[in-house]
Amino acid sequence: MQPPQPPSRSPDAEMAGPFPPDLHDVRHLKLKAGLLLLWVAVTFVATYFARDLQQRVFGTWPLGYWIAAQGAVLVFIGIVVAYGWAMNRFERQDAERNAAQASPDAADRPHG
């Protein structure tokens, strides 16, 4: 007795996964890698050099305190804002490119 065969899936069903394939575009991967490197630098490198940063004073508090209490949080918020801005920009570029491909003769038509 043979085990039951799974139903064959069409190629369109393969593309209907949780992530559309354009999320793995090179632009998106470079953006994610850059923001992840920034996150690692702020999280681990600043922590590693925290003792050295305590020697410098910013206002009345040591610089290490400012980075831990305020600076890291502001950088993390900046990472989220930069990711959202860049993804919106990528989506606009993709929409413009898809519109141009949908009607390639649109530039040849007279206006008005």
Image: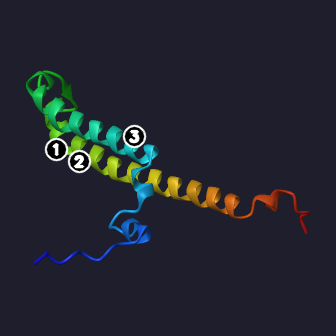
Quadrant (top left, top right, bottom left, bottom right) of the N terminus: bottom left
Residue type highlighted by circle 3:
Lys
Q: Secondary structure at mark 3?
A: helix
Earlier in the chain: of badge 3 and badge 1, it is: 3
Q: Residue 1 or 73: which is nearer the viewer?
A: 1
Labels 2, 3: front one: 3
Query: Crowding at label 2, few (<14), some or many (≥20) Cα neighbours within 10 Å?
Result: some
Residue 91 position, x and y percent, is: 52, 58
Labels 1, 2: front one: 2
The circle drawn on residue 5 is none
The circle drawn on residue 30 is 3
The circle drawn on residue 69 is 1
Earlier in the chain: of badge 2 and badge 3, it is: 3
Q: Secondary structure at mark 2?
A: helix
The circle drawn on residue 73 is 2
Q: Secondary structure at mark 1?
A: helix
Answer above or below: position of 39 versus 6: above
The answer to whether residue 61 is seen in the rendering is no
The answer to whether residue 91 is seen in the rendering is yes
Residue type highlighted by circle 1:
Ala
Query: Crowding at label 3, few (<14), some or many (≥20) Cα neighbours within 10 Å?
Result: few
Quadrant (top left, top right, bottom left, bottom right) of the C terminus: bottom right
Residue type highlighted by circle 2:
Val
Answer above or below: position of 29 versus 63: below
